[in-house]
Amino acid sequence: MSYQFITIEGNIGVGKTTFSKMLANELNYRIVLEEFADNPFLPKFYEQPERYAFSLELFFMAERYRQLGDLRDQDLFSHGVVSDYFFVKSKLFAENNLSDDELLLFNRLSDIALKNLPKPDLIIYLHSDVSRLQQNIQKRGRSYEQNISDEYLFDIQNKYFDFFKKHSDFPILVVDVSEVDFVNQSHVFQQLLNLTSDTYSKGFHRISLT
């Protein structure tokens, strides 16, 4: 089966962007990457989360909507797109970071935006244990990420799983990459690539790599 809009998701530091680039190159699909470096509130959020959380999440949501909206308007999804984020990610992080009043407003705005965006045909969620995530975060060396706690990563992980188990609008493949290296182990990448040519029912699927 040919999936025209493939979304790669996962926790902070799991390798979403790296894998998305590899997959898009192999499939000859257009790549859509989250422009986190353009968010001026990101470093400030990690220093003062309560003060900057709402501005951070609103900026991310607006940028994601702009990117996906541009693709929709140009009808580029029909030619194949790989994205390293799912728009609903905005709501999941907001649930973790915002106050109740802020979250109420944010969700209203997000629901309006979501109605105008296409849904992915396939989501591949790269799962990794928190210790491996922390290793990756330290290795890539973004200064504002160095103090992310294990608890925060566990919270984000649980938000994703709670969402996936409650929604069945598209196939969701959860793949544990804790013990593999899809960048340097070609057979691992090939297994992940093969997932995009199989047919899956809608809903949550756990996939084991051999």
Image: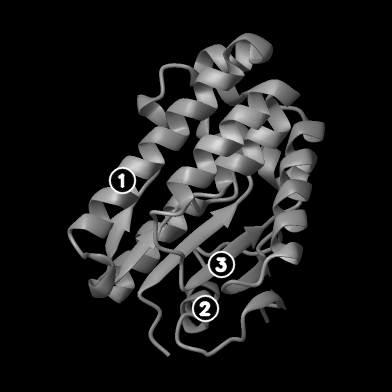
User: Which callout, 3 or 2, points at the residue further toward the start of the chain?
Assistant: 3
Residue 49's disc is none
The residue at the point 46 percent across, 77 percent down is 193
Q: Secondary structure at mark 2?
A: helix
The amino acid type, in three-letter code, at marker 3 is Ile
The amino acid type, in three-letter code, at marker 2 is His
Q: Are marks 1 and 3 in contact (CB under 8 Å)?
A: no
Which class describes the residues within 10 Å of circle 1: few (<14), some (14-19), or many (20+)?
some
The amino acid type, in three-letter code, at marker 1 is Gln
Circle 3 residue: 124
Q: CA distance from mark 3 to mark 2?
A: 17 Å
Q: Secondary structure at mark 3?
A: strand
Q: Is residue 96 left or right of residue 123?
A: right
Q: CA distance from mark 2 to mark 1?
A: 32 Å
Q: Position of residue 208 (x, y in %)?
A: 71, 78
| Vertical side of 173 occupied by 51: above or below | above
Q: Are marks 3 and 2 in contact (CB under 8 Å)?
A: no
Question: Where does the N terminus fall, quadrant-wise?
Answer: bottom left
Q: Position of residue 98 (x, y in %)?
A: 68, 25
Circle 1 residue: 67
Q: Quadrant of residue 148?
A: top right
Q: Is residue 183 left or right of residue 125?
A: left
Circle 2 residue: 187
Q: Nearer the viewer, mark 1 or mark 3?
A: 1
Q: Position of residue 56 (x, y in %)?
A: 51, 23
Q: Nearer the viewer, mark 2 or mark 1?
A: 1
Residue 35 seen in the current view: no
